[in-house]
């Protein structure tokens, strides 16, 4: 997929995020917009999805950003678009946090932070044991890296030689109740992961070319982590880098302004 197509896909994902957030009166729109470009790159140029039965696995560990994954799966035709209208609705199919039983492409049920990352490591370990070429990618939030389970997994992966596993940290420096650097600082994040034995790449999390290059970089026989520097609410100016958009509800006015900006 060339750059114009990726830009179109990112816009489509952002439009769907806004529409789902508005129609459901559900939160976490800023968290979903933050990772829209990461999902665009993964699903348009990185994940091997054909044949489906031997596909690479993607885990959205920061599962409160579920609308971003739902929109990406719909954009790729993996999930039927009609399901998006059921997001967070009574009797609907798509919950606010991920449930792997409701639609194809949702590889694990997640929501308790720190769990999806380690489920992904278990999958990668299983593929290694099977001598499979399948790979696993897991997207975690920067606030999520405050969880102790993340660092248990960070110790486990190099020990097991899981060079088939790539973590992506959505570093937007905003979590539910403040900035991670103030709540429980994880910086210097790249140096910490290197010290744990990971191959570390840093990239602008909204630059598709930079993300492609980071994913393509040789892992040197180690698990890889891509530290993606992002902006919460990216793509909608009044939502960008604003804490309230972790929980704030999209009104009709917000929706109209956001869709106009996204294009």
Image: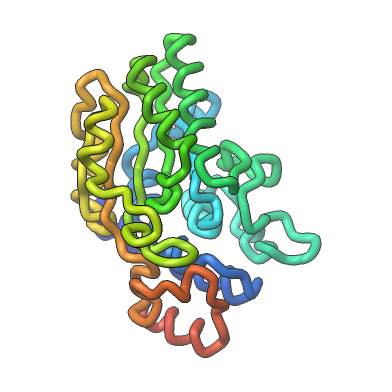
Give the farthest residue toward the bottom: 253
Please tell me how many numbered marks the rendered image carries.
0
Note whether residue 10 is visible. no
Residue located at (34% from left, 61% from top): 182
Residue located at (58% from left, 76% from top): 22
Note whether residue 170 is visible. yes
Q: Is residue 238 left or right of residue 194?
A: right
Residue located at (22% from left, 46% from top): 188
Residue located at (55% from left, 56% from top): 64
- Please state which of residues 138 and 171 is positioned toward the viewer in this rendering: 171
Q: Quadrant of residue 215?
A: top left
Q: Position of residue 66 (x, y in %)?
A: 55, 55
Q: Position of residue 78 (x, y in %)?
A: 55, 45
Q: Position of residue 11 (x, y in %)?
A: 38, 66
- Vertical comparison of 182 with 137: above or below: below
Q: Quadrant of residue 155?
A: top left
On-image quarter of the C terminus: bottom left
Q: Is residue 27 left or right of residue 167?
A: right
Q: Position of residue 57 (x, y in %)?
A: 48, 33
């Amino acid at each position: 997929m060339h750059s114009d197509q990726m830009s179109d896909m990112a816009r489509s994902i952002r439009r769907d995020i806004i529409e789902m957030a508005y129609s459901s009166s559900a939160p976490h729109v800023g968290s979903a917009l933050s990772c829209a470009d990461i999902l665009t790159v993964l699903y348009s140029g990185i994940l091997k999805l054909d044949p489906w039965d031997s596909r690479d696995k993607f885990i959205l560990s920061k599962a409160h950003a579920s609308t971003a994954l739902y929109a990406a799966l719909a954009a790729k035709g993996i999930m039927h678009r009609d399901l998006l209208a059921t997001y967070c609705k009574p009797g609907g199919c798509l919950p606010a946090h991920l449930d792997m039983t409701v639609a194809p492409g949702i590889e694990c049920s997640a929501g308790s932070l720190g769990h999806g990352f380690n489920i992904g490591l278990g999958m990668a370990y299983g593929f290694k044991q099977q001598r499979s070429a399948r790979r696993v990618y897991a997207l975690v939030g920067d606030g999520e890296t405050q969880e102790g389970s993340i660092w248990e997994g960070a110790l486990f992966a190099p020990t097991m030689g899981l060079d088939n596993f790539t973590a992506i940290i959505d570093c937007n420096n905003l979590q539910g109740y403040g900035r991670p650097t103030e709540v429980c600082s994880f910086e210097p994040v790249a140096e910490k992961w290197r010290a744990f034995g990971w191959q570390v790449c840093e990239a602008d999390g909204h630059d598709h070319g930079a993300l492609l290059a980071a994913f393509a970089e040789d892992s040197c026989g180690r698990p890889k982590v891509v530290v993606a520097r992002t902006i919460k609410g990216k793509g909608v100016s009044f939502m960008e880098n604003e804490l309230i958009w972790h929980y704030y509800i999209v009104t009709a006015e917000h929706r109209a302004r956001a869709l106009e900006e996204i294009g």
